[in-house]
Structures are given as C-alpha cells and as structure tokens.
Amino acid sequence: MLNVIIFGKPGSGKGTQASMIKNKYGLTHISTGDVFRKNTSEGTKLGNIAKQYMSKGELVPDEITIAMLESEILGFVPCNGFILDGFPRTILQAKSLDNLLINLNLKIDLVIGLDVPNDRLVKRLLERGKTSGRNDDQSEDKINKRLEEYDKKTKPLIIFYENQNKFYSIDGVGSLNDVNNRLINVVDSKKND
Ligand code: AMP
C-alpha cells in the first residue's frame, strides 16, 4: 500500500498530476477541492458553508475540512492506497490526518511538492479560469489571496514533513509528461527503498 500527498501552491498542477498517476499505481484520488465543489454545486449544507470561504480565496475552516476528509477516507478504506490532493493544508489538518491513519494502522509514505514560481501560477490560474468555471480562478485578487493563505498556513507543512523524512520537492515547470516522469521517479525510488 502506498499513501501519497501531492503538495503545492494553487495552480502548481496537483490535480492534473494526481489524475495522471492514480491509474499507474492503482491509487484512490481524493481532492478536497473537488469534494467541496461537488457539494457546492449540489447545494448541500457543507457546500453552502464551504462556498463562503472558497469564493473569497480563503481556506475552509479546519474543523469542517478535517471532518469531511475523514469521512472520505473511511468511505474508501480498505483500498490499495491514496493520493491526497489539496489536503492537508494546515498543521492541524496534517496532525489530524496522522492520528486518523494511526487508528487505521496506515501512514503517509511520501509527500511530493510541485515547485512552480508565483508569476507562472498566476498566469496558469487566470488561463484556467477562462474554461474551468471556477470563480476563484478568475480574479487576480482571489488568486493572490489563495497564495497568501498558502504562505501563511500551508507552507509550514514542508518542515513538518521534512521532519518526518517524507518530503520530496520536484520542479513543477515543464510539459505535463516531463513533470509526470519526475513524479514517477520519486514514487518508484521510494517504493524500491
Ligand atoms: P483546490 O481545488 O485544491 O484549489 O481548492 C479550492 C478551494 O477549496 C481552496 O481555495 C479552499 O477554499 C478549499 N479547500 C480545498 N482543500 C482545502 C483544505 N485542505 N483546507 C481548507 N480549504 C480547502
């Protein structure tokens, strides 16, 4: 079993790369952003709460996000392994995830960060916003807010996972296949450890 976190700033390609590798390794892909968007479009209570934060480019509060993620994971266990995309995004989320996995006799094996400079991210997100239908991709103010949230709340996770010897950073600039190959190299080297 292999449990992977795909980590990075908004627009770094987490979702795309997670979709590309999930079949290769038979992993269950869990994207918290996708789950929130599904709930938002279905008008559920969770979706209506999440929307208030997502539409401003802010993180959804931990309590809500952690409960949602836990029920997603519990719904998929047992399985071949997970690829988590967009979770955790705060230290509290990461600690809660560790506790949940300990209770399930599981663990995170590796965290792969996609490294992309901010100016490229803003361009990518504005471009994606033309077709994604995501209103948080459509204004530079919201994109900047999301990048600020990353710096303030999510970036400290790099040290958190470095301290667990699980963090690997790869260059997230290049063609989808180039980035995918870099990712596969890291996963394969870890699998063969
Ligand atoms: P994403 O699709 O990963 O870019 O996430 C879109 C938005 O969903 C974020 O800007 C947050 O508002 C919300 N979101 C997704 N994952 C999380 C998380 N782990 N913690 C808090 N908010 C989240």
Image (cartoon, rainbow, N blue to C red):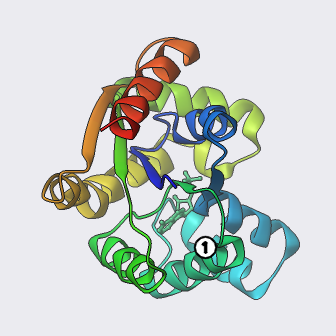
Residue shown at 12% from the left, 58% from the top? 163
Residue shown at 19% from the left, 61% from the top? 160
Residue shown at 25% from the left, 59% from the top? 157
Residue 96: % across, % down:
37, 81
Residue 114 seen in render = yes
Residue 48: quarter of image? bottom right
Q: Is residue 90 left or right of residue 81?
A: left
Q: Amino acid at mark 1?
A: Ile
Relative depth, front residue between 91 and 177: 177
Residue that sits furthest to the front in the current view: 192
Residue 98: quarter of image? bottom left
Residue carrying label 1: 73
Query: Would you call the spot at circle 1 few (<14 residues within 10 Å), some (14-19), or many (20 or more)?
Result: some
Residue 52: % across, % down:
61, 75
How many numbered discs sit on the rendered protein?
A: 1
Note whether 79 is above or below 61 in the view shown: above
Residue 55 seen in render = no
For label 1, the SS is helix
